[in-house]
Image (cartoon, helix red, strand yellow):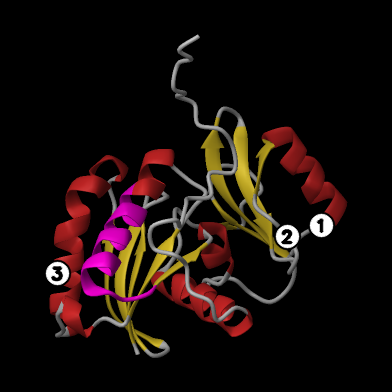
Amino acid sequence: MTWLLLDTSCPRGVVAVAEGDKIIAEIFLAETNKHGKELSSAVASCLEQAGITSRDLRRIIVGIGPGSFIGVRIALAHAKGMCTALSIPLIGVGTLDAMLRSDDVSDGFGWAIIDAKRGEVYAKSSATDAKPHALSLDAFSQELVRKKPDFVIGFGHDAVSIASNGPTSIGLLRAAQERLTFDANIDETISLEPDYCREPDAKIPSLK
C-alpha cells in the first residue's frame, strides 16, 4: 500500500512516500516560516522521486500536533484537500507519538517534547496510556525527577538527550500502523481536528 506522510507542526517539516513498511522518498522542510509556501511543491517533488502520481496513493498520514498552531494546520489542510480530491482515507497521528517511534529512540521509558514557548513544553511519555500535555519547564523537570526516563527526545528543555526538531517519516508511518492495529477506523476527513494541547495565544474577541 502506498502512503503519503505529512507533518509541518515543528521547525523541521517532513513530506514522504512509503510503500508498505519502507520509506521510498523523503523531503525535509527546514525553514519554519516557509512550510506553507513550500509544502505543495515538496509533495509534488516527493511523488516524482517515488515515481508515482497522486492517483497511486491509497492513504495519507498527517501529524495533528501539538506544535506550532499555524504549522499544524498547514499539513492538515493540505492532507484534507488531497484526500477529498482523491477519495482516499486520512489518518491523523500525534506528532509526539511519531517522535517516540523514531529510529533514534531506544527501548525503555522516555519522553518526547516540543518547545511550546511561554516557558512550556508539549510533552508525552512513552507509557501506553499517556496523553500529550503542555507543562511548564519546572513541572516537566519535576516529572523527570519523579519518573527518571531513559531518554528525552525533542527540543525545548535542557534534559533532551536525543535532539530532534520534528518527527521523522518512519516515525509517522510506525505511529499510523500502530494506531490501525488497534483501531481500524479511519478519520473523518472533514471533522479531523488538530491537537493543540492548549488554547491558542490569539483569540477571537468577544462581541459583547
Q: Nearer the viewer, mark 1 or mark 3?
A: 3
Quadrant housing residue 128: bottom right
Between discs 1 and 2, the one toward the N terminus:
2
Q: Is residue 75 magenta?
A: yes
- SS at badge 2: loop
Q: Is residue 154 magenta?
A: no
Residue wearing tag 1 = 148
Tell me: residue 206, above or below residue 146: above
Tell me: residue 189, above or below residue 19: above
Give the amino acid type for the residue marked by disc 1 in the picture.
Answer: Lys
- SS at badge 3: helix
> 10 Å neighbourhood of mark 1: few (<14), some, or many (≥20)?
few
Q: Is residue 153 visible?
A: yes
- Residue range highlighted in magenta: 74-89
Point out residue 154 in the picture as x, y percentages from the top left corner.
Answer: 54, 54
Residue wearing tag 3 = 45
Q: Nearer the viewer, residue 143 or 51?
A: 51
At 86% from the left and 50% from the top, the residue drawn is 146
Q: Residue furthest right?
A: 146
* The N terminus sits in image quarter: bottom left
Task: Determine which of the numbered discs, if any, sits on residue 130 in the image.
Answer: 2
> 10 Å neighbourhood of mark 2: few (<14), some, or many (≥20)?
few
Q: Are marks 1 and 3 in contact (CB under 8 Å)?
A: no
Label 3 – label 2 distance at C-alpha: 36 Å
Q: Nearer the viewer, residue 115 or 52?
A: 52
